Structure formats: C-alpha cells, structure tokens
Amino acid sequence: MVIPAKLVATGLVLAGIINLLPVVGMAGAAWLRSLYGLEIRSVDLEILLRHRALLFGIVGALLLAAALRPGLRDVAMLVAGASMASFIVIALLVGGYGPAIRKVVIADIIGLLALVPAIVARLAPSHR
C-alpha cells in the first residue's frame, strides 16, 4: 500500500501542532492553570510543568522538522508516539481525571491517529 507523501507530512504536522500547544505553559502559572485546569500551589510544581511544556515544544518541533525531512521521521514517530501513548495509558490507569486532562487524552489520541499514515508508510514493504 502506497501512502501519499503529502498525507504523511500532513499527519506529522498535525501531531506536531498538538504537541506544540502546551508550550504556552512555559509562560507561567496562569497559562498552566488554563491548560490543565488546576491551581499551581508550589514553585516545584510550576517548575515541573513548565519543563513539561518545554519538552512538548521539543517533540512538536521534531515532528514539524520530520514533515520536511524524511530522515527524521523514524525518531520523531518513536518519540512522539511513546510520549502520547504513555500519557493515555497513565491517565487510564490512574483514572478519575477531570475535564482538562480528558482534553489532553483526546488530543493525544488524535495525535497518535495523525501518525498512522507515517507509520504505515514506514512499515510498507516498498519502504524496506
């Protein structure tokens, strides 16, 4: 099965944008509060969440770069896929999360689905 290159690139861009959205959390506690719907009551938590926002920016930038540079696609899919899938699994295992985390779970599911064309293209026999 041949997956059109534009579909692969579009999926990577969509997943990249989803990963870039939390980057605004680097701007401080007010942005983190709006993203996750929780009060940031300690400096330690703010540091952790702001760093998390930065890491998402790195993953998002990698995905956008992979949309343009096929040589980056394997690592981008691995890193982004592991990040999004692990968040979904952790959220489901812990359970009882609120609406803000539910939005993140849904966004990560969409992000994973956006990677499917790139994964299928990579696994296609013609790619090997």
Image: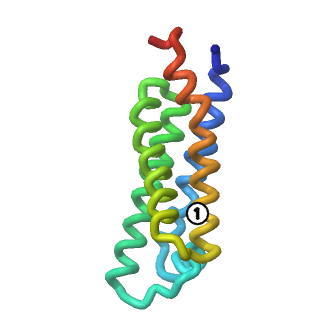
Tell me where residue 2 appears, x and y as whole percent: 64, 14
Instruction: Count the numbered circles shown.
Output: 1
Q: Nearer the viewer, residue 121 or 58?
A: 121
Amino acid type, label 1: Val
* The quarter of the displayed image where residue 100 is located: bottom right
Q: Which quadrant would the C terminus be assigned to in this image? A: top left
Tell me where residue 54 appears, x and y as whole percent: 42, 61
Q: Is residue 109 above or below residue 90?
A: above
Number of other residues with Cα within 10 Å of mark 1, as a class: few under 14, some 14 to 19, many 20 or more = some
Tell me where residue 48 appears, x and y as whole percent: 36, 73
The single residue placed furthest to the left in the displayed view is 44
Q: Which residue is mark 1?
A: 104
> Residue, x 44% and y 62% (percent of image)?
90
> Residue, x 45% and y 48% (percent of image)?
59
> Residue, x 37% and y 66% (percent of image)?
51
Q: Which quadrant would the N terminus be assigned to in this image? A: top right
> Residue, x 53% and y 9% (percent of image)?
126
Tell me where residue 24 appears, x and y as whole percent: 54, 67
Which element type, helix, strand or loop, lies under badge 1?
Answer: helix
The single residue placed furthest to the bottom in the displayed view is 41
- Please name the colour scheme applied to the rendered image: rainbow
* The quarter of the displayed image where residue 36 is located: bottom right
